[in-house]
Image (spheres, rainbow, N blue to C red):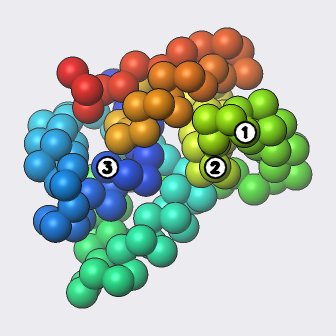
């Protein structure tokens, strides 16, 4: 089964019709028939951004339920240490915590296809195993 990692940007854009990337995110995510996976850090960040949208938090919860979104924990001490290392390595890009957790998850799952709007970051980032990402919404 095909797996896409899901970043915050497309998730928020999908839920917010006012977002300039809404159509791109909606078209890409709606057409995808595989499994969407993300991290708890991405969910936390997305929930913050959709909290200002009427019904946003409920819509995010419904999206997660309807798509059978797989959400991985990312706050174990060893994961935090690796996230901090990655954030330091890519400080000039910059890399936030949610991005760092997705980079780690990619190696964990062996999946490097990502739904993101962060072209600059995910074009530059390499996983701990030196793998690159395929930005699926750009295709």
Q: Residues within 10 Å of mark 3 (few under 14, many from 20)?
A: many
Name which residue lies at 14% across and 65% down.
17
Height in image: 81 above or below 120?
below
**Residue 9: which numbered mark, if any?**
none
The part of the image, by quadrant, that contains residue 99 is top right
Residue topped by disc 2: 96
Q: Nearer the viewer, residue 57 or 35?
A: 57
Mark 2: secondary structure:
loop
Mark 3: secondary structure:
helix
Label 3 vs label 1, nearer the camera = 1
Q: Residues within 10 Å of mark 2 (few under 14, many from 20)?
A: some
Q: Residue 81, percent across and down?
A: 87, 44
Q: How many marks?
A: 3
Q: Quadrant of the C terminus?
A: top left
Q: Nearer the viewer, residue 69 or 49?
A: 49
Q: Are marks 3 and 1 in contact (CB under 8 Å)?
A: no
Q: Residue 132, percent across and down?
A: 54, 15
Height in image: 9 above or below 122?
below
CA–CA distance in space, label 3 to label 2: 16 Å
The part of the image, by quadrant, that contains residue 59 is bottom left
* Mark closest to the chain's N terminus, 2 or 1: 1
Residue topped by disc 3: 10
Residue topped by disc 1: 91
Q: Are marks 3 and 2 in contact (CB under 8 Å)?
A: no
Label 3 vs label 2, nearer the camera = 2
Mark 1: secondary structure:
loop
Q: Is residue 127 left or right of residue 34?
A: right
Q: Is residue 3 left or right of residue 53?
A: right
Label 2 vs label 1, nearer the camera = 1
């Amino acid at each position: 089964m095909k797996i896409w990692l899901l970043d915050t940007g497309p998730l928020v854009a999908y839920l917010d019709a006012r977002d300039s990337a809404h159509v791109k995110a909606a078209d890409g995510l709606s057409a995808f028939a595989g499994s969407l996976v993300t991290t708890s850090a991405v969910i936390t960040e997305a929930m913050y951004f959709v909290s200002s949208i009427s019904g946003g938090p409920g819509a995010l919860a419904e999206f997660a339920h309807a798509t059978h979104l797989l959400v991985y924990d990312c706050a174990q001490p060893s994961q935090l240490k690796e996230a901090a290392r990655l954030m330091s390595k890519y400080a000039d890009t910059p890399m936030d915590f949610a991005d760092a957790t997705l980079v780690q998850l990619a190696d964990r799952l062996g999946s490097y296809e990502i739904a993101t709007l962060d072209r600059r970051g995910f074009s530059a980032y390499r996983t701990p195993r030196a793998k690159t990402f395929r930005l699926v919404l750009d295709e």
